[in-house]
Amino acid sequence: MPSVLITGASRGIGQAAAKAFASAGWDLLLVSRSEAALQSLKAELSASGSRVVYRAIDLTDPSVIAPGLEELLNQGLRPSVLINNAGAAWTGDLLAMPLDRWEWLMQLNLTSVFQVCAAVVPAMRPAGGLVINVSSHAARNAFPGWGAYCTVKAALASFTRCLAEEERGNGIRACTLTLGAVNTSLWDSPTVDSTFDRRAMLPVNQAAAALLHLAQQPATQVVEDLTLMPATGAF
């Protein structure tokens, strides 16, 4: 079976993606902060016949990422697809943002992606593979109150393009899934102030289906960016 490594796997898009990939016959390497949530998800997904291994890693702590991923990879699966999905948002005036919140957002949404790729991609090179970074159309736009999020997603898009160029000769492809608003627990976060109609947002299963579609592309091609937006009015 092919294997996929998914960060932020215990809820939202990551959990929906884990279920979609398991249903399609993939083995899974799962990462999130919650050990209990990962245990529960493993029990559910193992019934599909997929092999599931996991590691609880707090991606906001740069010191635990490399050793945690080393332990995960030592469980016997080598991913052919890496999905960097974990992320968060913060809303408020850009220049009023506390420095510790800026550093937290950059660590989780960007620096941890660099760290995960640095730890996992070398193990993928012998057989080739695909890196999918989950981005946002905020990378291409400027929304008042969302300046830090727009900034970090723009940087993620640039990182992905650079990674694709550098790893092309190693048989590693890289792309972004660029999403409009998706109805996830991000909107419940105390760091996000929003009155958007969540019923008009994309459901997580549609984002998961897009991730599976990208992963199933033949190794001879890459969809460099797939943009998926809600059609019902949400941004």
Image: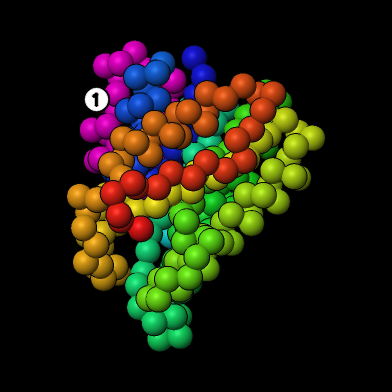
| Magenta segment boundaries in residue numbering | 26-51
**Residue 190: x %, y % from top left:** 24, 68
**Residue 22: x %, y % from top left:** 37, 22
Could one spot residue 10 in this view of the protein?
no
Which of 144 and 132 lies nearest the eye of the viewer? Answer: 144
Q: Residue 75: within the magenta?
A: no
Q: Residue 41: within the magenta?
A: yes
Which of 209 and 3 lies nearest the eye of the viewer? Answer: 209
Could one spot residue 208 in this view of the protein?
yes
| Left or right of 67, for residue 91 | left
Examine the image and state in which quarter residue 36 appears.
top left
Residue drawn at point x = 25 percent, y = 25 percent? 43
14 relative to 86, above or below: above
| Left or right of 117, for residue 194 | left
Q: Which residue is mark 1?
A: 44
Residue drawn at point x = 24 percent, y = 62 percent? 196
User: Amino acid under label 1?
Assistant: Glu
Which of 89 and 112 lies nearest the eye of the viewer? Answer: 89
Residue drawn at point x = 26 percent, y = 16 percent? 47
**Residue 153: x %, y % from top left:** 51, 60
Total marks placed: 1
Question: Callout 1: helix, strand or loop?
Answer: helix
Q: Residue furthest right?
A: 169
